[in-house]
Structure formats: structure tokens, C-alpha cells
């Protein structure tokens, strides 16, 4: 299964996917392209270093549809789209092309704390645990069907950064596992008709 990864920033989740693939742990999935809306995303450097095609499509100065048409063109051979720190909301125009085969990773136990700074939201709320969710992307923000979650404790003295680091340690294991399981047919999702 050809996988396209969309990124905007640091790309540690992309790195986890690349490392899993290099260890033979992603098959039958293979990453065939990495696309960033941010031309200076460190994630693009990670993709190139791993020998993957890396494409920058700067969204500034173009309509959402024009941007998404370029994304769709870049992803033409892709069967599964993974959002790994991708900071653009995708519209039904894009989602219709991939018929439910778009997943995202989010640093909270959804439906709690959708949106920006989920670790900071969890600390402000005073909850005792948070975690990571891998979910299907639909037209809601962080609201699609949940595929898998792993929880982590929140401990005294945690900052948003320390909590996010604890969450990311789990996220870097969970996301490659879910991509492999989707490719292997162990997780089935997508349109039912
Ligand atoms: C991750 O924690 C992910 O859950 C969120 O954005 C962060 C991206 O980090 N959507 P990275 O770029 O993969 O390091």
C-alpha cells in the first residue's frame, strides 16, 4: 500500500514512520511521497535523507481548492494519506478524492482537547491523564472515527512540553503500528458504500 505523508513542521512522527519502514516494520505499507505546505519544514529534510520524494507546496497566495488540487496531484499514486503534524484543515474537496483513507495523529485522548495545544489544554483542565489518538480525518477538526488510543499519566510539575514529549514517545510507536495494520487489512475503514 502506497502511503503519502503530509507534514508542516519538525517531523518526528514522519521519522518514526521512516525508521519503521527501514526496519521492515511498515510492510506491506511503503512511504512513496512526503509533502509539506511549509517549504522550510525540517520534515522535508528527513524525507530526503531517507531517500523519499519530498515536495513543498506553499499554500500562501492560493485558494484552498488550488492548494488541494496540487496536493491531490502529488498524491496520485497514494492509497493512504497520513497527516503527521500537518497544520492545514482539509476540505471535502480533498477528502472526497481519498474516500475516507486519510488518518491523523493528535496528542490527546479525543474527544477531549481537540485543536491546538492539546497538551496545554490537558494541563489547564487538571486531568490526571492524556495520551495520543490516531483517527480517521473527516470534515470536523479532530472529530473523525477513532482507530486507536494510548494513554499517558500527567505528573506533578508537567509543562505542556514535558507532557507532549511523553505523549510523543507513545505516538511514535502507535502511528507506524496503525499504518502497518491498515495496509495489512487488520484495520478496515473507509466508505461503506
Ligand atoms: C504531533 O504531536 C501530532 O500529534 C500533532 O502535531 C505533532 C507533530 O509533531 N498533530 P512532529 O512534526 O511529528 O514532530
Image (spheres, rainbow, N blue to C red):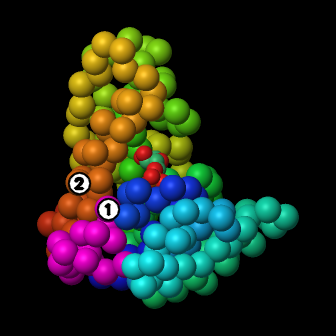
Q: Residue 16 has which mark?
A: 1
At horizontal 25% and vertical 45% (from top left) the residue drawn is 170
Of the 4 image quadrants, the one containing the C terminus is: bottom left
Of the 4 image quadrants, the one containing the N terminus is: bottom left
Q: Is residue 73 above or below residue 89?
A: below
| Label pair 1/2, CB-CB below 8 angstroms | yes
User: Which stretch is magenta?
Assistant: 16-31
| Residue with the mark numbered 2 | 173
Percent position of residue 151, x then y: 23, 34
Question: Is residue 27 found inside the magenta-colored segment of the image?
Answer: yes
Percent position of residue 61, x then y: 84, 64
Q: Is residue 73 visible?
A: yes
Question: Is residue 145 found inside the magenta-colored segment of the image?
Answer: no
Quarter of image, res 91 = bottom right
Quarter of image, res 15 = bottom left
At horizontal 55% and vertical 63% (from top left) the residue drawn is 42
Badge 1 residue CB within 8 Å of ligand 1: yes
Assign a secondary structure to mark 1: helix
At horizontal 28% and vertical 45% (from top left) the residue drawn is 169
Give how far apart the Cα atoms at labels 1 and 2 are: 7 Å
Percent position of residue 165, x then y: 36, 38
Q: Is residue 38 above or below residue 148?
A: below
Amino acid at each position: 500500500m502506497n502511503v503519502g505523508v503530509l507534514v508542516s513542521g519538525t517531523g518526528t512522527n514522519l521519522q518514526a514512520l521512516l525508521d519503521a519502514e527501514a526496519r521492515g516494520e511498515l510492510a506491506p505499507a511503503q512511504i512513496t511521497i512526503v509533502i509539506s505546505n511549509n517549504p522550510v519544514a525540517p520534515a522535508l529534510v528527513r524525507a530526503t535523507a531517507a531517500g523519499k520524494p519530498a515536495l513543498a507546496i506553499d499554500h500562501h497566495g492560493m485558494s484552498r481548492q488550488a492548494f488541494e488540487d496540487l496536493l491531490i496531484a502529488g498524491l496520485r499514486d497514494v492509497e493512504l494519506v497520513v497527516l503527521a503534524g500537518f497544520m492545514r484543515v482539509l476540505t471535502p474537496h480533498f477528502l472526497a478524492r481519498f474516500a475516507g483513507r486519510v488518518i491523523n495523529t493528535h496528542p490527546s485522548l479525543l474527544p477531549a482537547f481537540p485543536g491546538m495545544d492539546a497538551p496545554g489544554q490537558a494541563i489547564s483542565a487538571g486531568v490526571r491523564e492524556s495520551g495520543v489518538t490516531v483517527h480517521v480525518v473527516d470534515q470536523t477538526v479532530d472529530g473523525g472515527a477513532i482507530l486507536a488510543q494510548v494513554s499517558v499519566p500527567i505528573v506533578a510539575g508537567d509543562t505542556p512540553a514535558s507532557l507532549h514529549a511523553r505523549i510523543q514517545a507513545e505516538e511514535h510507536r502507535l502511528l507506524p503500528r496503525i499504518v502497518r495494520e491498515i495496509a495489512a487489512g487488520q484495520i478496515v475503514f473507509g466508505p461503506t458504500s
